[in-house]
Image (spheres, rainbow, N blue to C red):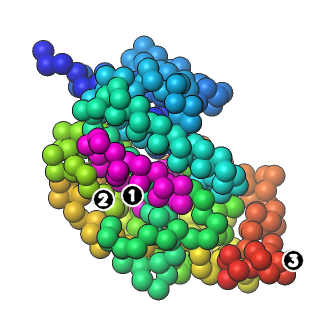
Amino acid sequence: MSQKIKVLLTGAGSSIGRNILKTLLVHKEQFDITAFDVKKGKTMNFLEHFKAEVKVIYGDLAIPEESIEATTDKDFVIHCGYLSESASNRNPRLAQKINVMGTRYLVENLECYSPSCFLAMISTVGVYGDRLRSPMITVGDFTAPSIGDSYALSLLQAEKFVQDSRLEWTIFRPGIVLDTEESFLDSSFFKMPLTSHLEFVHIRDLAFAVVSSYERRASLWNRTFNVGGGDLCREIYQNFVQRLIKIAGWGDIDFPERSFATYNRYGGYFSDGDALEEIMHFRAHTLEHFFEELQKSQTLISRLTTKVFGDLQKKNFLAQSEPYKAFKQNDEEKLRLYF
């Protein structure tokens, strides 16, 4: 019997991390899995279910000593252990500590304790910043996160530590991730300009690509890839919003002028997206598949409709629009971020 691949997954309790962990477990005959994340209620509630099959280590990547055990004697490391996008943008200093310095310490520990490992880092399309005028993106394009996007800026800085390391690595920059377990209806809903060109990737396709990267590492070594679903996962944001609202059962909702930002976000179509597909053959889901899953997801639909017909009626949902709030208050500093 061949020896199992010793894999470490950071950020195992995050949305992306959960799906990667589930994909690893589908192939558990190949992997000896270690899951690493901070010790907090939501994360523990999820990871404790897998303790019979997964070694769970709790710790903080920003404290180097806490990840030594996790980073010792590993063949494959999947890194998505970051502060979330919304939390990073609310607290840029914490994003620097966790996303940037946490990645630095992870890399340093791996260089010391698992110098021959293959590191797959998950980054974000946000590193390219606003692409309304030039929506076609390649990995060689200039990176310039939008003003105030501390999450994308921190991951771009984290990428540098990976790229400059002595490890074998690859970096994945996924487009907008489609996950029926995550609601698109929060304050970020209004920050995306309606005219944005967006390339999506289904969460299960992303997880498959990441997990499969170890066996294809010879073709991925020291390369960065945009990860998108291709032509069938591309849409203008306004059309995406209309379909989302229809499935939620909201009818036609016309938000007031200045509800949505008109620039300073991110998005675009990956003109080089087929490069990874040719290596990994990971694309199995389209945007239509996502909407079909969303339609069948009664739990999610209930969650969405509750936002309007329960505690959050239309007016209260609009109150989450930071662009609209800046417009109504004539906040010149914030207006420059959105219009």
**Residue 112 at x, y percent in the picture:** 35, 29
Query: Closest to the observer: 161 or 151?
Result: 161
Residue 306 shown left or right of residue 6 in the figure: right
Answer whether residue 100 is visible to the viewer in this image.
Answer: yes
Residue span colored magenta: 152-181
Which residue is label 3 attached to?
329
What's the CA distance linking mark 1 and mark 2?
Answer: 6 Å
Which residue is label 2 attached to?
225
Which residue is label 1 attached to?
173
Residue 195 higher or lower than 151, as above or below: below
Amino acid type, mark 1: Arg
Query: Closest to the observer: 7 or 201?
Result: 7
Amino acid type, mark 2: Phe
**Residue 295 at x, y percent in the picture:** 51, 54
Q: Residues within 10 Å of mark 1 (few under 14, many from 20)?
A: some
> Which quadrant of the rendered structure holds the C terminus?
bottom right
Q: Contact (CB < 8 A) between labels 1 and 2?
A: yes
**Residue 332 at x, y percent in the picture:** 80, 81
Q: Earlier in the sequence, mark 1 or mark 2?
A: 1
What's the CA distance linking mark 2 and mark 3?
Answer: 41 Å
Which residue occupies 66% across, 54% down? 92
